[in-house]
Image (cartoon, rainbow, N blue to C red):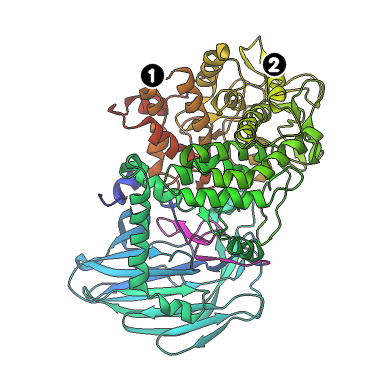
Amino acid sequence: MAEVTRRLAWPSVVGADPDAGITREWLVTNGIGGYASGTVSGIVTRRYHGALIAALPAPLGRVVMVNHLFERARPARGRTQMLGEAHHPPATARRPAAVLSEFRLELGLPVWRFDLDEGVAIEKRLMMPYGHNTVHVRYSIVAGTEPVQLFIQPAIHFRPHEASVSQALSGDFVLTALDRGRYEVTNGTDWPTLRLVAHGRRRAFVLAMRTLPEVLYPTEESRGYEARGALWSPGYFRAVLTPARAFVLTASVDDWDRIRALPPSRAIAAERERRRRLLETAPEPAREGPAAELVLAADQFTITPVGRLEEAARARAEGDDVRTVIAGYHWFTDWGRDTMISLEGLTMVTGRLREAGCVLRTFAHHVRDGLIPNMFPEGDNEGLYHTADASLWFFQAVARYLDATGDRFTLRRLLPALIAIVDSHIASTRFGIGVDPGDGLLRQGAEGYQLTWMDAKVDGWVVTPRRGKAVEINALWYNALRLLDAWTREASIPTTHDLRALAARTRESFNRRFWYEQGNYLYDVVDAESGGSDAACRPNQILSISLTHPVLDPSKWATVVGVVRDRLLTPVGLRTLAPGHPDYKPRYYGDLRTRDAAYHQGTVWPWLIGPFIDAWLKTYPKAVPEARRMLEGLLAHLDDGCVGSVSEIFDAEPPFTPRGCIAQAWSVAELLRCLVRTGPDPTDGLVAREMRSSSGRN
């Protein structure tokens, strides 16, 4: 199996995109919700950037522990140069920067090459041991024969993950020196202890405590958030690099016994081996090329939630494990809807079937009033349940899991929860979610709540009000009824309701009431709160074809697929609203209010390419090459945004700039799933280039 590497020759990247230093980012995760992330060039632009963001039990949740590393190097016969760039280097005068000549991902892990004076080149690598709140940053000489002096200065501001960068430095930082190059930084009793240890030749720590005021975070500024704040530094580590001896800085909130148990060399080797096993576990089509890269990217989202201790204890007592899915980095936690949509691509397509079962059983434990949680807030053990579709996506995820595994044992464990979901929806549950006895369709809506995936608020006002009977909610409802009917019959379990009759009535009403004759597509909402039906052309209608049990009559498939292709399809996914609508927004940019107003009013969501390709192949089973070409724009995106991953959203018009979270679970999952499903394509990518240079299909 070939080593999976994505390589960017940095001078050529910068030549094509002068802003590449801040628009390309990297991400490393630790399997429990923690991570490290930054821009490729080292410029700090987000409050979420840091060398160590630890995942801790409630009430802390994720905490930013090491915000930045200022790095300098001096060859034996050269000047001191910065490795990477920063807006506020600790030196009084800005020092010259080494040339970043290459950035690459090896097995998904970031590697930088810096060219210094005198023909010297230094390589920097960063990794986090799986399951540990620890980061190792390794520096080594890869060109040149003379020693190099290295200076690494950590800058810190202990703060909650979502806290503003303008939050004042609280308390007094205390640095404690221990033996063998070990140091501890504390700040009162509210924060964990940050432990630092240096590994290398002629290493030392130079005490030089100082506050770095007014550090600017440009991306936060562009998003309308507080963008200036202070950092604190205890001093800097100094070491001598030789061609034969590297230097490693370790930062951790784990205890010393845990840190010592897995020294850097073993931790790095273990993590590389773990990643190779992920590829070996994946099916054959996902072991090479972009699919293999996406297998490694998918690994970032499936986690063991470190904070939910009671739940973990219960699961272990049952011989099970708790697993969940981080919806996106940097700011999302685990969301029920995102988890169920992305589960197949993250776990089943990657061969991680056991974890898929753990995720389903974990969420089944949290069913309340026929709903699974919409999300778990940061640092909280209890979920929030304001969602009308997550519980219905649960059925589709179970169906895909059973197709992949045939695991009837898990199905038997899940059936009580699945039956309770349907019964609660028929009887009506929270947030106005319930079946209309007049037509059998599912309605939803409650003042102040965003219940479907396409809801967004601005100043307490829902921008895309969808109270009523939404098209995808009813497609999911019909699918759930059909699936549960088959499963209960197979298990000889009696049900309170005649599920087959309910499904038939839902299908009849759906096809009669949702068809918009004038546009030859489906209404987005019928019986809307404002009265009548919403005829906006949106991508939600594609779910009426794509699910396991399509609710739309097959005679209308080609028409709907054609409208969605012609009006919503772009090189990077589907628009959320067709151009020409009065509310259409071509660009997602600006402060929170402006962005939320555009979130579902044209903005492209890459995850929707999955349902579209499913619908396309149901309608045109032999048109696999065409489906494959629809993925080329997203494959090209793996060099942009978060390198090797897929962004949450894109602008609706060229150049389709990536926006939102830099790495999104369902974006990665659906691209990977479709990539494996459509197989290799011998075309040269001409179609994708033509689409990318056009305005998309209007």
Q: Name the kind of residue labelled 1 in the image.
A: Lys
Range shown magenta: 30-59
Viewer-side residue, 41 vs 106: 106
Q: Which residue is mark 1?
A: 622
Res 693 visible = no
Q: Position of residue 564 (x, y in %)?
A: 54, 21
- Asked if the magenta segment contains residue 222, the reply would be no
Q: Is residue 513 visible?
A: yes
Quadrant in the rendering for residue 310 = bottom right
Q: Secondary structure at mark 2?
A: helix
Q: Which residue is mark 2?
A: 508
Residue 407, disc? none
Q: Is residue 524 left or right of residue 148?
A: right
* Position above or below: 253 against 29: below
At horizontal 44% and vertical 46% (from top left) the residue drawn is 645
Question: For this rendering, which residue is in front, 651 or 79?
Answer: 651
Residue 135: % across, % down: 44, 68
Label 2 crowding class (10 Å Cα cut-off): few <14, some 14-19, many 20+?
A: some
Q: In the picture shown, does residue 330 fall above or below 67?
A: above
Mark 1: give few (<14), some (14-19) or many (20+) Cα within 10 Å. Answer: few
Residue reaching furthest front? 492
**Which x, y percent locates residue 478?**
66, 27
**Mark 2 vs 1, N-terminal side:** 2
Does residue 387 sit above or below 257 in this rendering? above
Measured Cα–Cα span from mark 2 to mark 1: 29 Å
Where in the figure is residue 490, as x and y percent of width and height?
59, 34
Q: Quadrant of residue 59?
A: bottom right
Tell me, yes or no, whether the two marked residues, 2 and 1, touch with CB atoms within 8 Å: no
